Amino acid sequence: MKKKVLSFIVVLSMLSALVLVPLPASAATYGDFTYEVTDGKATITGYTGTETNVTVPGEVDGYTVTAIGNSAFSGNNTIRKIVLPETIVSIGDFAFSCDNLANINLPNSINHIGDRAFLCSNLTYVNLPTSLTSLSDYVFEACSELAYVRIPHNITSISDDFITGHDADLIVITGCANSAAQTYAERNNLTFATLPCRDHTFRNGACFCCNVLLGDLNKDGVVNTDDYTIMIGYVNDPSTCPNLSIADVNQDGVLDIYDRLFLLEIIAGIETWPA
């Protein structure tokens, strides 16, 4: 009798253990895509099609697509262009190891890009989303044709090995002045180009761009006629301007007489900062 009871207890324990083991994500297909569902969200895990231009669906069989899984498109050398939906928040490791991929959009919903997510020798232009805050190792590896990478100021941490296998003499990193993008470029001897930053914050009537007060050319914390005097010199000889992003007060990307006039109107209270 004791043996029967003991056997019954062992069986119950085994059944309980099976119940506690989490079930694997369900796998399915949607057209040329394979996907898995976890917690009601879909992850694209593969592509079996032969199209050169591929649009990833934002929904499959009623499930919102929120991720591109590890190695999802790896080894597909037919694809040249991929369009991602605005629902994507994560791109896995080796997701786009596609030799001939030359064009891909990166929506402002993405908050994670895995290691070696892009092994694309034909990729030339990258405009990173503002939803990212950091860039880890080898995001872009063996991208020998990569010539232009725009890094938003939201990204505050960038690994030195973020981009590998490129021609350092050809690639240009663009972003806001005094940003992590500039630090990364200078640290790795890459060309850096400052672009006007459109992400402004306003405090007490003053306009800040990447926590720098626009128009505060002498960096004393206020914008006044002293800054206007400095601006006159900068406009007369733009090469003497050490920081375009602060002096380009009308945010049109160039330093000219219109910045001088705009700054004067700001100081006089006639004009307000551009939104």
Image (spheres, grey):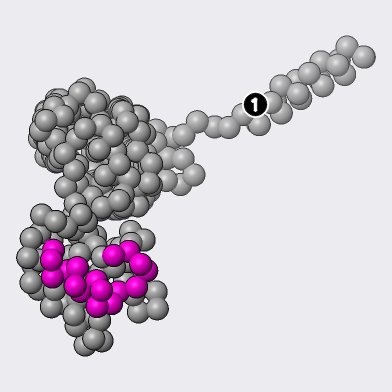
Is 222 in the magenta? yes
Q: Residue under label 1, please give it.
A: 18
- Answer with left or right where residue 87 lies relative to residue 23: left
**Residue 57 point in image, percent of width and height:** 25, 47
Residue type indicated by callout 1: Leu
Q: Based on the displayed image, in which of its 4 quarters is residue 55 positioned? A: top left
Q: Residue at x 25, y 81 (%)?
A: 267
Can you say whether 11 is above or below 273 in the image?
Answer: above
Q: Can you name the residue that lies furthest to the top here?
A: 3
Q: At x 24% / y 71%, what residue is drawn?
A: 227
Is residue 83 in sight in this rendering? no
Place of residue 69 in the rendered image (x, y in percent of width and height, measured from the top left): 35, 33
Query: Helix, strand, or loop for circle 1?
Result: helix
Q: Quadrant of residue 102?
A: top left
Name the quadrant of the C terminus.
bottom left
Left or right: 138 as drawn, with respect to 13: left
Left or right of 112, for residue 232: left
Residue 222 x/y as whole percent: 34, 73
Residue bounds of the magenta highlight? 218-234
Residue at 35% over, 79% down: 205
* Near-viewer residue (210 or 127): 210
Q: Is residue 113 above or below residue 245?
A: above
